[in-house]
Image (cartoon, rainbow, N blue to C red):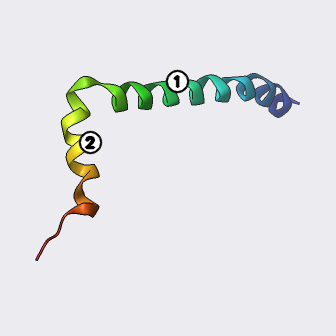
Amino acid sequence: MAGDLIGEVLRPLWLVWLVVVFGAILVYAYRPGNRRRFEQQGQIPLRDDQ
C-alpha cells in the first residue's frame, strides 16, 4: 500500500529531474566559455600526429 503511494508520488518527479538534468547539460554545452575547448576537442580526430 505505502509502496504504491510512494511510486505514484515519485514517478512524476523523474520527469522533472530528467528535464532539469537535460537543461543543465544544454547550459554547460552552450556556454560561450566552452566554445574554444569544444572546437579544439572536435579537431582531435582530424589531426595528423606523426
Provide residue 22's location: percent of width, then percent of height. Answer: 51, 30
At horizontal 81% and vertical 25% (from top left) the residue drawn is 8
Q: Residue furthest left?
A: 50
Provide residue 25's location: percent of width, then percent of height. Answer: 43, 32
Residue in front for this viewpoint, 38 or 27? 38
Q: Of helix, strand and loop, which one carries label 1?
A: helix
At horizontal 58% and vertical 25% (from top left) the residue drawn is 19
At horizontal 10% and vertical 77% (from top left) the residue drawn is 50
Amino acid type indicated by mark 2: Phe
Q: Quadrant of residue 35?
A: top left
- Tag 1 residue: 20
Using residue 15 as the reference point, say whether residue 27 is left or right of it: left
Q: Quadrant of residue 37?
A: top left
- Tag 2 residue: 38
Q: Quadrant of residue 43?
A: bottom left
Using residue 30 as the reference point, say whether residue 40 is left or right of it: left
Q: On screen, 43 above or below 48?
A: above
